[in-house]
Image (tube, coloured by chain):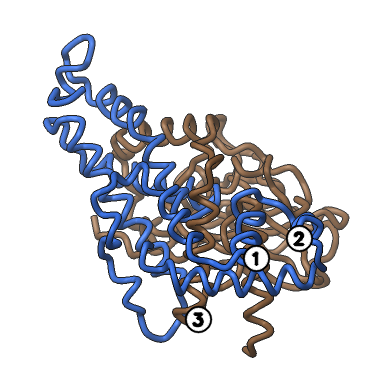
Amino acid sequence: MNGEDRYDILNRRIEEMLDERRAQEPGPQDPGELEMLKTAAALRGGRPSAPGPMPAFAEALEARLLRERRPAPAEAPSPSRRKLLLGGLTGIAAGLLAGIGLDRAAEQRAPLASPIPPAPDPELVGNSGRWFAICSAGEVPAGSGRRFRKGAIEGFIANRDGQWSACSAVCTHMGCVLTFREEHTDLFCPCHGGQFNTDGSVKRGRSTLKSLPGLRVKEEGGEIYVWCMEELPPATPG
Amino acid sequence: MGEQSLRQTQPNGSGNADEVLLAVYRQNLDPIYRYIYSRVGNREDAEDLSSQVFLKAVRGLETERDDASIRSWLFQLARTTVADYWRQYYRGPTLPLTLVPSEAPALESVQEESRAPLVVEKILGDLPQNYRRVLQYRFLEGLSIKETAAEMGTSEGNVKVLQYRALRRAAELGGVYL
């Protein structure tokens, strides 16, 4: 990249920072630029009016910490079903944690195509994530959708008359990966037959089945992007 | 709280683990968050990293420690979490020395919590006036490019250039404090 591009990228990062947002673009490529960004962060972060934690954040994290202490579910999936799960805990955890983006929905700056369905446990976990390009908008006709796997997320995007939504494609029952059925316009679980609508809500299933956590989605330059966590480290065998 | 351990401060004296965790969290979230915010400069990252620190803390908390040493341990966790954040963000081919964890000189004796305003003062202190002004307007006061241009009686394009040069100079002079 020439000097002009890095200059623009740095100026954009400054605007994001002043808007209280994390970086959306790749980081600095040379030490000088790194020091400039650290200096910017220290100036902005050290200003007299620098805020403390927001009450909503503090409460959500408190609830999250208490849940962290509860024992994990005792029953593990049987070996015959395990092959339908994603590499053990990584995939399940990724799918279930896809609710991360939810509590930010209210602050979402980019236009969100449709309301994200409420997740059972909106959680704040500090894993790194970024926007992943899924496909071009034209590839998914209105009324349809597409499955994708990006970063640590197995997900699904839906086009409802030009309005885009995205959700996890990991069944909230036992963590099996869902199949998109074009002919039924739903997400189907091969393990126990649960069915979800393309917006993540439960279409048919046991009464305790919870809707699929939503993901942040945006359309930019004719491309569809979803915010996904980066690949998680492999789970320890257990 | 001084030398008291958390078990002694619980009203029912039972040392219930959840209550202990909540006490640690409620006593320390604000200073930890503010410290992290002072190093990353935006709310989203400060929230993410604060969450990481306390999630790590849940797993390693030794409640027999007194409040002061628990806080000290949390700040150590926060320091390494912030260092990891910059290390992961940096995309250069070789790791610059500044990303190797070490205490910044000259301000070591100052408590983490009150260090940030001093860092700002040090960074701005030696700059020429127009560089200092643009950084004050943009970062301390949060003025837009347009507003800053109005304050400084110049064009928006000039403000962007000035901001870039001021930041570069400030980084050269004040980087040691980070």
The secondary structure type at the circle numbered 3 is: loop
Residue A191 visible to the viewer: no
Position of residue B162 measured from the top left corner of the image (x, y, whole percent):
67, 71
* Location of mark 2 (residue): B152
| Residues marked 1 and 2 touching at CB (< 8 Å) | yes
The secondary structure type at the circle numbered 2 is: helix
The secondary structure type at the circle numbered 1 is: helix
Foreground pick, A192 / A40: A40
Task: Give the letter of the chain under mark 2.
Answer: B
Task: Give the letter of the chain under mark 3.
Answer: A
Q: The residue under label 1 is which amino acid type?
A: Asn
Chain shaded brown: A
Please identify which colour was used for chain B in the image: blue
Above or below, A136 relative to A202: below
Position of residue A15 measured from the top left corner of the image (x, y, whole percent):
67, 60
Task: Give the letter of the chain under mark 1.
Answer: B
Above or below, A198 relative to A14: above
Residue at (34, 47) in percent of width and height: B53
| Residues marked 3 and 2 touching at CB (< 8 Å) | no
Asked if marks 3 and 1 fall on the same chain, the answer is: no
Residue at (65, 56) in percent of width and height: B138
Q: CA distance from mark 1 to mark 2?
A: 9 Å
* Location of mark 3 (residue): A29
Any mark on residue B130, and which? 1
